[in-house]
Image (spheres, rainbow, N blue to C red):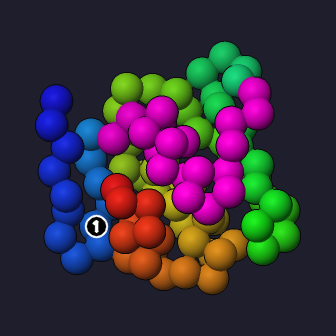
């Protein structure tokens, strides 16, 4: 399944939890544990924050946006578009 780059900072589709976890390494997030299908990723960059990412083949756009990307963008004082560029999603 090929991933296409969305235009204009749109939330990407067909992205896996593993791909999101790998992309978040740019901002200092590391997978520290997995409980069931949830990956826990903390960071100490700009203070501490952790996010949980579902280890699914495809994340729903609402889950990806509201549960992962928006909190990470707010923590790092980035817009959603800036975050997507930084993560290369």
* Residue at figure coordinates x 28%, y 67% from the top left: 10
- The residue carrying mark 1 is 10
Residue 76 placement (x, y as % from top left): 65, 75
Q: Quadrant of residue 3?
A: top left
In this view, the residue in front, 26 or 69, is 26
Q: For the N terminus, which image quadrant?
A: top left
Residue visible at 63% across and 82% down in the picture: 77
Whether residue 55 is in magenta: the answer is: no
Left or right of residue 31: residue 2: left
* Residue 8 position in % (x across, y down): 22, 76
Describe residue 31's horizontal placement relative to residue 60 as left or right: right
Q: Is residue 1 left or right of residue 82?
A: left
- Residue found 76% across the figure and 56% down from its top: 43
- SS at badge 1: loop
Q: Which residues are magenta?
A: 15-33
| Residue 62 vertical placement versus 18 (above, below) | below
Residue 73: image x %, image y %?
57, 72
| Residue 26 falls within the magenta-colored stretch | yes
């Amino acid at each position: 399944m090929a991933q296409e780059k969305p235009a204009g900072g749109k939330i990407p589709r067909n992205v896996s939890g593993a791909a999101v976890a790998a992309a978040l390494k740019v901002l200092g997030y590391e997978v520290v544990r997995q409980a069931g299908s949830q990956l826990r990723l903390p960071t100490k960059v700009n203070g501490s924050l952790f996010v949980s990412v579902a280890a699914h083949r495809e994340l729903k756009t609402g889950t990806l946006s509201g549960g992962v990307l928006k909190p990470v963008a707010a923590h790092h004082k980035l817009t959603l578009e800036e975050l997507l560029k930084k993560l290369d999603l």
